[in-house]
Image (cartoon, rainbow, N blue to C red):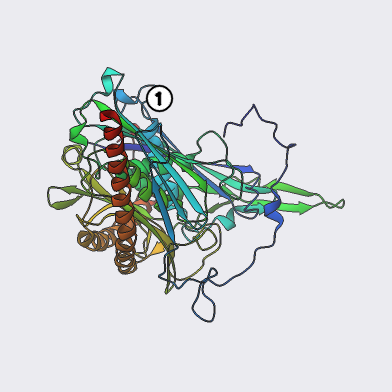
Amino acid sequence: MPLDGKRICGPEGTKSPLLFIPKKQTNLLDDNRKRTDGRHAEDLRPLFLRLGINSQARGSAYIEMNRTKVVATVYGPREIQRRREFDMKGQLLCEFKFAPFSCKVRRQYQPDNEEKALSSVLRETLEPVVCLHKFPKSRVDIFVLVLENDGSALAAAITCAGAALVDAGIDMYDVVIGCGLRQDEATTLVDPVYEEEYRPEDNHQSGEHGNMVLGFMPLLQQVAALQCDGELQPKTVSAALGMLMESCYGIYSIVQECLTESLKNKLKKREKDVTKVIS
Amino acid sequence: ANTDVLVGVKAELDAPESSQPNRGRLEFFVDCTANADPEFEGRGGEDLALGISSALSQAFSSSNCLDLCSLCVLPGQQVWLLYVDVLILECGGSLLDAVSLAVKAALMNTKIPAVTVNTTEEGSSEIEVSDDPYDVNNLEVSKVPCIVTLTRVGHQFVVDATKEEQACSIGHLSVAVTESGSLTAVRKTGSGSLHPESILDILQTAQEIGINLNQQLVEKVKLESSVKKDRRGFLT
């Protein structure tokens, strides 16, 4: 990987102190069937969503799920400069970025492979949602920045980017809601925090295990994104899918409320501006 | 149309990642040559290459797929690093499926030289590679997955789609299936969306096909390695 030459890196062979912390073996659920943060297995974290946080962008949104914090901004649609990229359908440019301080280990400024892969996942999630035929020969830019990653960052990014597109007034078929899930044998945890997320480097010798992320369009009942890893059986995946869809409807009601609220505020502001001009 | 893929595996001794001191490493590199499509010229194939390599690493991410712990030589110091280099020579549809089959076949064929670790009196360790070129170990590949992609054409789903079928479709679901039938990765690609009810059918079909595909591949590779044919040229 190319190193950032503008910064002073530590001496050669330096290791992160986090490697020397002994790993704690904690159970996902305690004796009362509660998770480490006191939630039940199928509970979501409290969600905060606000639109229009960036006055310069066409549209923007900020989402907070306890300690997972994500900002998304939308610019465009703008004309495509290079002629060979012309398409009668609109194009989306997505950038998914972790802030350098967002994770336990410092992230580099240059996009790494994980960020590039997540960017293309995000693009493929938003493409079925946006009415691309309305923007021929043009491109919409969507930038997603994870300020703090405490699990389910991709899911939060999907919801946030969807809300930012709504705020930008881009024509869409439906809003899109993201939700994550962790499967560990018979235990299913919705909306996992960082410690609960499945990591392949930990040894899982037996049973089914894995992570799932769903991007769901609640009104059209369409799956815009589906990502699973680990080791799962088709039956488990479809059972988990049902659970995720249920949670997505839960998130959807919050998002809907937030969208109507923001629209009301926008209309009020416009009314004020109009009366100002008249007087 | 044909899909031609060439996969090579090279093993090197290298330091392990500091977060996983007793595991070997597996790295995928995909090169889309301009032979396959003039659009790949220069950096044009980079996006596709990155997509394929990230799909492969996602499919191989489960620790049960390929036992990386067996690739450890000296914990914390030296492990085997496997470079899986994929060269795409011709794209005729179902590229990801073909690549995953080729990767599995290449890993079955991979031979890792036997090494012994000697500890000297001062306490330092020396790694000695066996002199005998036939003193090699094979990798355990029974849990390595193959990827099955179902392509949505109209209201139906097609396996092993041709280039034309792919051009007509907007949504794909790629499923990595092991020989025992567990799914190690599922990902939706393409710009379309899928109905949740069809996903269960897709997954079950993909599982059946995947199990079959794995078995056929293993049989074919065994046959290929046992029979010595009079070959003229590489591609015949």
Name the residue tied to disc 1.
B43
Q: Quadrant of the C terminus of chain A?
A: top left
Compare residues B83 and A256 and report the one nearer the observer.
A256
Compare residues A215 and B216 and report the one nearer the observer.
A215
Compare residues B161 and A69 and report the one nearer the observer.
A69
Label 1, secondary structure: give it: loop
Query: Residue A64 location, x and y as percent?
Result: 46, 53
Compared across the picture, whether B87 is left or right of B173 comes to: right
Specify the subunit that label 1 lies on: B
Q: Is residue B181 above or below residue B12?
A: below
Query: Residue B131 location, x and y as percent?
Result: 66, 45
Q: Is residue B37 above or below residue A45?
A: above
Q: Quadrant of the N terminus of chain A?
A: top right
Residue A154 showing in the rendered view: yes
Query: Residue A278 location, x and y as percent?
Result: 25, 29
Label 1 crowd bin: few (<14), some (14–19), many (20+), radius 10 Å: few
Residue B87 showing in the rendered view: no
Which picture quadrant has residue A99?
Answer: top right
| Residue sitting at x 24%, y 36% | B92
Q: Is residue B69 above or below residue A161?
A: below
Which picture quadrant has residue A274?
Answer: top left
Given the image, on which type of amino acid does mark 1 rest?
Answer: Arg
The residue sitting at the front extreme is A279
Query: Residue A110 location, x and y as percent?
Result: 53, 33
Compare residues A11 and B161 and report the one nearer the observer.
A11
| Residue sitting at x 69%, y 62% | A22
